Image (cartoon, helix red, strand yellow):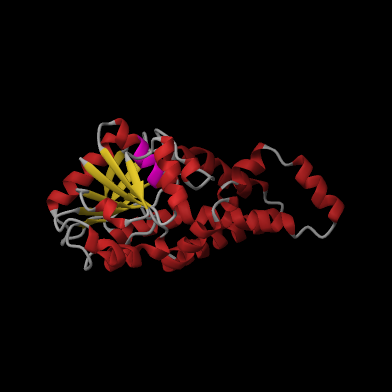
Amino acid sequence: MRIGIVGLGLIGGSLGFDWRDRGHTVLGYSRRPETCERAIARGVVDTASSDPTVLQDAEVIILATPLGVLEATVQDLRGYWQPEAIVTDVGSVKQPIVSALEPLWPRFVGGHPMAGTSENGIEAALRGLFHDRPYVLTPTDQTDPEAIAVVEQLAQELGSVVLRCDPASHDRAVAAISHLPVFVSASLIQTCLQEPDPAVQALAATLASSGFRDTSRVGGGNPELGAMMARFNQAALLEQIDRYQIQLERLKTAIAAADDAAIAAILQQNQEMRPRYL
């Protein structure tokens, strides 16, 4: 199959690696010629160009650009695609994207491969990034069944666990387990930076180890990605932040009252339930 990838960063590049390894022809597009050159050199794509005609023979188009430019990308490039081409995206928010893109392309399938690292760009692309990771498809009543089947097959070839849900449910779920953690983690880093004693702040930086590394990782990641989460999944994210604040106040009250039993009960429940989410 001929697969066109628009956007050759971490996600687009990693998809290119794996699908090429499985015998597909991968055609890459980036507005930056140097990115195209690196993608070819690294073996991410068979060919790549900053000229969108590189996509004209693709049977499937993967939109791996930032959320904020997805709609404009489709409007700019759809004239270069085959009329029967299947188009899917990899964005971490689905309802506004599906609502915007479905009217622009009849064979569009909302998608979200849930994997990543703290790095970005073509040099960060990895083989096997999506193995054993969820790959969510968010079809609607208007989605072409054949298009769904093709995207699902491609996702399965990555070794991903393919799931289907409606776009709104996806956004509520990822707000809780993906987007909220980014902003909780960001707040942790900001809290450390607000320590008023420079000596204590320096000591904290020196002492920071695996606990801080693990809890601060997503808050110290790609700023553009976090900003797009906040913009495009605003309502669901705010709802989860409200819930988080309630739980933080619950713990704060127990700590202030030296209520060891209440604290222990919360932590015990967390210890028992955490594996459900992993």
Q: Nearer the viewer, residue 171 or 106?
A: 106
- 10 vs 256: above or below: above
Seen at 23% across and 59% down, the residue is: 80
Q: Position of residue 68 (x, y in %)?
A: 42, 65
Q: Nearer the viewer, residue 259 or 125?
A: 125
Give the image location of residue 232, x and y in percent. 42, 66
The answer to whether residue 159 shows anywhere in this view is no
Q: How many labels were placed on the picture?
A: 0
Between 246 and 167, which is closer to the camera in this rendering?
167
Residue 89 is at least partly visible in this image: yes
Q: Left or right: where does residue 203 sit relative to residue 271?
A: right
Report whether 218 appears left or right of 26.
right
Q: Quadrant of the C terminus?
A: top left
Rendered image quadrant of residue 153: top left
**Highlighted range, magenta:** 12-17
Q: Nearer the viewer, residue 244 or 87?
A: 87
> Residue 102 location in percent, x, y?
23, 64
Check residue 16 for magenta coloring: yes
Q: Residue at x 21, y 57 (%)?
A: 81
Percent position (x, y) of residue 188? Answer: 65, 54
In the displayed structure image, the side of residue 47 where residue 222 appears, left or right: right
Using the rendered view, name the quadrant where residue 104 is placed: bottom left
SS assignment for the magenta stretch, majority: helix
Question: Is residue 178 found left or right of 262 in the rendered image?
Answer: left
**Does the segment drawn in magenta span residue 4?**
no
Image quadrant for the N terminus?
Answer: top left
